[in-house]
Image: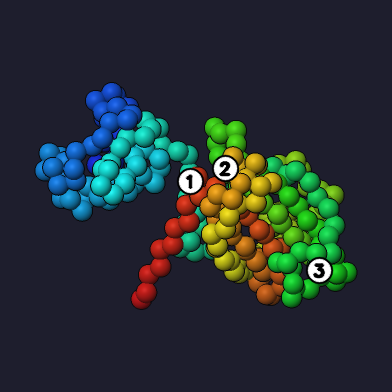
Amino acid sequence: MTALHQQLAGTILTQIQTGKLRVGDKLPPEIEYAAELGVSRSTLRLAFAELERVGVLQRKKRAGTTITSDRPKSQFNMSTTGLHELLSLGRDTDLVLSGTKTVRADKITHLNGHHSETGHWLEISGTRTLPGEAVPFNSTQIYVPARYAAIQHVLKPSEPSVFRIIEERFDLVVGRVSQTAQAIRCPAGIAEIIGIDPGAPALRIVAHLYDRNAVLMEISIATFDPERFQLQTDVQVD
């Protein structure tokens, strides 16, 4: 069942798209609007937050709530309730490859402390794009240790994920994913790729994928446009 605030967000969006409310309009103060809609103020705030997250509304202190768009921005939602969901990015979007090359570990900060048999790694670069959009929401570099570098010769221009190829070619299964997320100022080169301003806030996720024997399979460094990507965690304590 859809939560009440989500139903309310859908109702407000419908009113905007049908012209009852217009882009540029200011919505009434929360206490008045909640009474008008017959909902609690907390429910209205949650609905506003939902619409603000997708770029339909903009809320500012002392300036109120303004309608800024009649179309929600496309967004990829990664849920982290389990390993299957954590790997959803490599299941639900394609990585369009832009190049591969061999790099030395000492040239890449994120490879420090990790072992590759030859001291070299296969670097695979690419982007991910949401359905129906032209501008990628993500720029990714994946580093594969030398023991799996032979996959370079079977990579296609577009792949759901690199780890799947390693699993298939070497009869392995991902058993553990360790990842960190960090807010960064987006480097100019990546900013141009994902369509944001250089130095603008971006989200960087560094993920280490291991097989069931705790052997490292790949390290991925992905930079996201935060307006089009959401990382959701839902953990239950028994």
Q: Residue at x 29, y 24 (%)?
A: 18
Query: Tag 2: Cα neighbours inside 10 Å, few (<14), some, or many (≥20)?
Result: some
Q: Residue furthest right?
A: 118
Identify the mark nearer the N-term, 3 or 2. Answer: 3
* Vertical relation: 137 (above or below) 26: below
Residue found at the far top of this picture: 19
Answer left or right for 56 relative to 99.
left
Q: Position of residue 91 (x, y in %)?
A: 59, 50
Quarter of the rendering containing residue 133:
top right
Name the residue at 16% across, 41% down.
Answer: 33
Q: Disc number at residue 106?
A: 3
Q: Nearer the viewer, mark 3 or mark 2?
A: 2
Query: Could you give the CA–CA distance between mark 1 and mark 2, rounded to whole angstroms?
Result: 10 Å
Q: Amino acid at mark 1?
A: Glu
Q: Please tell me which residue is depicted at 88% across the width and 69% down the height of the picture.
A: 118
Relative image position of residue 51 (x, y in whole percent): 34, 42
How much space separates mark 3 and mark 2, taking CA atoms?
A: 30 Å
Q: Which amino acid does the dot numbered 3 rest on?
A: Asp
Residue 40 disc label: none
| Few, some or many residues within 10 Å of mark 1 (<14, 14–19, 20+) | some
Q: Residue at x 78, y 56 (%)?
A: 123
> SS for tag 1?
helix
Label 2 residue SS: loop
Query: Left or right: 230 with respect to 223?
Result: left
Disc 1, disc 2: CB below 8 Å?
Answer: yes
User: Most extreme residue toward the front, as rendered?
Assistant: 62
Q: Which mark is residue 227?
A: 1
* Label tally: 3
User: Which sits earlier in the primary sequence, circle 3 or circle 1?
Assistant: 3
Mark 1 or 2, nearer chain start: 2
Q: Could you tell me how far apart the alpha carbons at marks 3 and 1 are, in whole angstroms?
A: 33 Å
Q: Which residue is mark 2?
A: 196
